[in-house]
Image: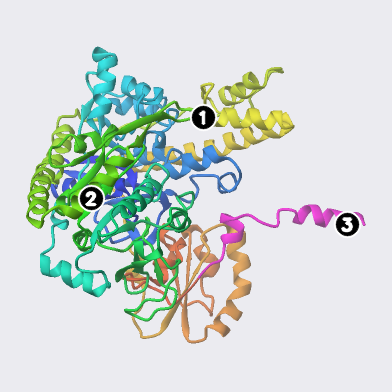
């Protein structure tokens, strides 16, 4: 039976986010069914060598060489940066080259631009087989969510509140929207035993009678850490006899996050009242202690400045995270808004009493009788008009007091109920089959044709249009062959630059250069698809051409062009003199191999493969042992990052002098 090509666009599994937590379970579930070829487009990263060999499915990074404009990415074009980071610049290539038949999108909705998806030609071909699984986190539901709901036949929300809101507004228009939770590996989260809890408290110098309240989440402004601090101070003032501490599991140095160290002081708390988690980047062990700044020395492996607080790059495993939850007595989830907070799921699976905000995605938790509901009032966010939850401080203070006075038996009873509900609700055995059933119900897509994207027109005539907006929209339409809406970020950016005085001629020339580059990519894509249509790809394994003679190997990569290959000959003698005990291998295009034939300094000539442009793959890192001991990508300055383009200009100036 033919396997379906299933594409999944979401966070990389190499980082720690709510989306990657979900994908880390869903992708292996689908892969193990042995019914699908899985292709993962990893948002936010390039073709990371760490992906090679780590996962059995096909991985793409969004920053692929030749697929985006590096100079534009490094400029102040924030819209382009965001589009590139989320994969909007490469999604068409990803879909077409891999002949994706099922496409699943898992991220915040603004990660998927309307132009790259809903208004694209490939989307019209694949429309019925595209599923978007997103997390609205506030009311009112944004117009962008409504647009996707109207143009996409398969829209699933992580929280039930958003489905109810839209269907209440217009049931007929939105009746196809579903509520499907995200998932996590429930087997990795569990309550720890009492003796383990006592040992951990002893290890970290925490009083055995001290009640520990954990607040776990990314240090973002919508996670209201200040409320926890302020209410904890008031609780301690009202109940000086109670022994309690806060534990913040987050990066205390998160960019644009809360200044937690300063706020601790501002609210009158001692440093010892608010603990944090550190992990070591060298040995990966963790410990709990007051915040002393980032880059602390590790007491376990003695590495200097190796300990930091955990953010998205944390190496703390989920099983170790269960111990961190286990040392605590209750969990706080305080936020202005939420989709599906993973800490809510994790807390319940670890058997902790949970205080959850009674708004948006967390309502599904706060409505359970074993969860403490955090009520409050609402404010409105500037710009969006979103309703944002303002927690009732008295409820938080009461929660602290209730937990401190609660018997161990009562806590276990609450914890047991919460764990049983979480196991029945979030297990991949529950969520996975929902995705599987949907995939298997889709009609097959016939990709056996050459995808004909319309070529751009870099020499198009542009009429003299006085209005800046209409002028830029004409550049898009006539040169790049696309229509843009008035709220398009690129359109707004170019209008702003015109208002700031940038000449129209410069902007027009930029559009023409983009058109030329796009045409190159389109023609190359057509060529590849034509070659692969009726024949199987030939795999060239360069490892078979490496000699295991005990000598070191040096790889010199000179893929293109003829001039570079000829010029590189001048370097070979000095290279061999410097690396006299190495065998020199040269990798180049088959068309240029004769340039190096018979050269006395070269040990062997290899056919160039794309993986050879990555030094870490060639020389090894971590579990990857690599193939060579030395390496140089000689054409980096001439083919990948152009420089010294003023050479001709300088030569002319010197000539006329």
Q: Secondary structure at mark 2?
A: helix
Residue under pointer 3: 655
The span picked out in magenta is: 632-657
Q: Which numbered disc covers residue 401?
A: 2
- Quadrant position of the N terminus in the picture: top left
Residue drawn at point x = 72 percent, y = 32 percent: 500
Asked if one can make out residue 447 in the rendered structure from this viewpoint, the answer is no
Residue 231 image position (x, y, % from top left): 34, 48
Q: Label 1 neighbourhood size at 10 Å, few (<14), some (14-19), many (20+)?
A: some
Residue drawn at point x = 31 percent, y = 33 percent: 376
Say which of 108 and 105 sits in front. Answer: 108
Residue under pointer 1: 455
Query: Up-down: is 155 above or below 632?
Result: above
* Front: mark 3 or 2: 2
Image marks 2 and 1: residues in contact by CB distance under 8 Å: no
Residue drawn at point x = 51 percent, y = 21 percent: 485
Scheme by which the image is coloured: rainbow
Residue 98 image position (x, y, % from top left): 32, 42
Asked if one can make out residue 617 in the rendered structure from this viewpoint, the answer is yes
């Amino acid at each position: 039976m033919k396997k379906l090509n299933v594409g999944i666009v979401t966070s990389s599994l190499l980082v720690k986010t709510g989306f990657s937590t979900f994908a880390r379970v869903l992708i292996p579930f689908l892969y193990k069914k042995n019914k699908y070829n899985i292709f993962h487009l990893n948002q936010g990263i390039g073709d990371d060598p760490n992906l090679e060999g780590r996962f059995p499915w096909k991985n793409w990074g969004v920053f692929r060489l030749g697929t985006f404009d590096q100079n534009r990415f490094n400029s102040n074009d924030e819209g382009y940066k965001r589009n590139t980071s989320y994969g909007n610049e490469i999604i068409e290539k990803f879909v077409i080259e891999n002949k994706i038949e099922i496409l699943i999108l898992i991220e915040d909705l603004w990660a998927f631009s309307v132009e790259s998806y809903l208004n694209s030609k490939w989307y019209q071909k694949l429309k019925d087989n595209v599923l978007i699984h997103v997390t609205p986190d506030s009311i009112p539901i944004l117009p962008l969510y409504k647009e996707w709901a109207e143009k996409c036949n398969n829209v699933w929300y992580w929280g039930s509140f958003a489905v109810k809101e839209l269907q209440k507004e217009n049931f007929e228009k939105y009746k196809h929207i579903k509520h499907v939770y995200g998932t996590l590996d429930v087997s990795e989260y569990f309550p720890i035993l009492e003796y383990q809890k006592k040992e951990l408290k002893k290890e970290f110098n925490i009083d055995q009678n001290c009640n520990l309240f954990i607040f776990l989440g990314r240090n973002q402004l919508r996670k209201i850490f200040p409320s926890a601090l302020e209410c904890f101070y008031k609780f301690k003032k009202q109940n000086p006899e109670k022994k309690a501490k806060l534990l913040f599991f987050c990066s205390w140095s998160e960019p644009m996050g809360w200044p937690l160290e300063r706020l601790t002081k501002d609210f009158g708390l001692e440093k010892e009242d608010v603990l944090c988690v550190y992990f070591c980047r060298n040995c990966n062990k963790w410990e709990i202690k007051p915040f002393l700044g980032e880059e602390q020395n590790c007491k376990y492996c003695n590495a200097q400045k190796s300990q930091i607080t955990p953010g998205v790059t944390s190496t703390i495993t989920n099983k170790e995270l269960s111990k961190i939850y286990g040392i605590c007595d209750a969990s706080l989830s305080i936020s202005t808004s939420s989709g599906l907070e993973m800490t809510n799921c994790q807390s319940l699976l670890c058997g902790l009493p949970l205080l959850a905000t009674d708004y948006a995605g967390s309502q599904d938790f706060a409505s359970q009788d074993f969860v403490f509901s955090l009520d409050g009032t609402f404010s409105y966010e500037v710009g969006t008009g979103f309703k944002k939850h303002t927690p009732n401080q008295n409820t938080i203070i009461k929660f602290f007091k209730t937990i401190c006075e609660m018997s161990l038996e009562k806590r276990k009873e609450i914890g047991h109920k919460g764990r049983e509900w979480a196991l029945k609700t979030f297990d991949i055995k529950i969520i996975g089959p929902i995705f599987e059933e949907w995939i298997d119900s889709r009609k097959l897509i016939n990709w056996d044709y050459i995808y004909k994207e319309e070529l751009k027109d870099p020499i198009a005539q542009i009429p003299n249009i006085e209005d800046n907006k209409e002028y830029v929209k004409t550049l898009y339409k006539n040169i790049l062959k696309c229509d843009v809406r008035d709220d398009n970020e690129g359109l707004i950016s170019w209008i702003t630059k015109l208002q700031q005085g940038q000449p129209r001629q410069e902007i027009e020339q930029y559009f023409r250069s983009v058109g030329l580059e796009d045409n190159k990519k389109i023609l190359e894509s057509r060529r590849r698809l034509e070659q692969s249509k009726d024949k199987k790809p030939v795999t060239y394994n360069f490892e078979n051409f490496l000699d295991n003679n005990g000598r070191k190997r040096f790889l010199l990569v000179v893929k293109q062009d003829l001039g570079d290959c000829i010029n590189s000959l001048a370097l070979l003698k000095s290279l061999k003199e410097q690396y006299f005990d190495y065998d020199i291998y040269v990798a180049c295009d088959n068309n240029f191999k004769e340039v190096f034939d018979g050269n006395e300094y070269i040990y062997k000539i290899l056919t160039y493969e794309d993986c050879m442009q990555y030094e870490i793959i060639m020389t090894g890192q971590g579990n990857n042992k690599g193939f060579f001991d030395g390496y140089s990508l000689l054409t980096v300055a001439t083919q990948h990052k152009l420089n010294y383009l003023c050479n001709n200009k300088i030569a002319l100036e010197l000539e006329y002098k």
